[in-house]
Image (cartoon, helix red, strand yellow):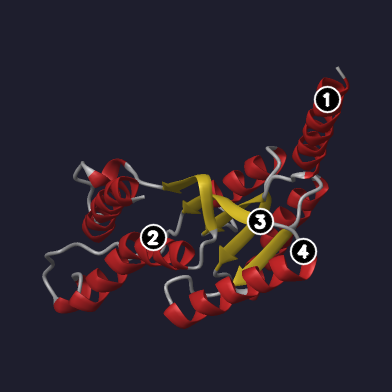
Amino acid sequence: VIGHCCSTHSRASRLSGETRTMAETVSPTPWGLIVGSSSGFGAAASLELARAGLHIFCVHFDRRSNMPQVESVMARIRENGREALFFNINAADPGKRTDALNQMQEYWKKIGGEHFVKVVMHSVAFGSLKPYLAESNDEELTQQQMDMTVDVMGNNLVYWVQDLFRRKMLGSGSRIYAMTSAGGHSVIPSYGAVSAAKAVMESHIRQLAYEL
């Protein structure tokens, strides 16, 4: 009987320790990373994710004249009790992307705890709206404009996700979203380059979903 009591006490102690350990375990803090966040869908998504409990990293590319809009989005995120870190950079520049991700990770280290990017949203709207064919070379789409549009609005998504993946900034349950449009499958005047970028982006996100 004594042996049984001791065994029970020992088991209870272990269970109590397990309970304390479970209670002390804190889930990683979720963040949203919005690439193209100062207006439109990107700004709306930033605010909605903040309301849902995520802190926000916002990547945007704005002139000084649009900074009041950016500051308004930042203030509204913080009104929801969430952190908001903004990076005014060319999101398609590899060096700028590296610098921004370094700063994000450094901020995580500064505040302590475990963190991960729960939601990635690519909402960059920057491309050429010229027709493929025109009476003069000046009026039609150039190779440089095509390459820029497809890279910034399509391929850029892959490069951000690759860096996040290698840095282990994504976690279990992370989600990746990208904004497409009817132009990805429809003909719209002077929308050819953007339409191509949207089709490319849709293909990329299917592949990322498979590989992740």
Residue 212: mark? none
Identify the mark at residue 3; answer none if there is no mark.
1
The image position of residue 191, as x and y in percent, is: 26, 54
Of 147 and 170, the residue lying toward us: 170
Between 159 and 60, the one lying in front of the other is: 159
Mark 1 closeness class: few <14, some 14–19, many ≥20 residues within 10 Å: few
Q: Nearer the viewer, mark 1 or mark 3?
A: 1
Residue 112: mark in rendering:
4
Q: Name the residue under label 2.
A: 157
Disc 4 residue type (three-letter): Gly
With respect to residue 3, does 51 lie above or below? below
At label 2, the amino acid type is Leu
- Whichever of callouts 1 and 3 sits on the residue coming sooner in the sequence is 1
Q: Give the Cα separation between the discs numbered 4 and 3.
A: 9 Å
Mark 1 and mark 3: Cα distance apart in space = 46 Å
Local SS, label 2 = helix
Query: Can you identify the residue that label 3 sits on?
Result: 115
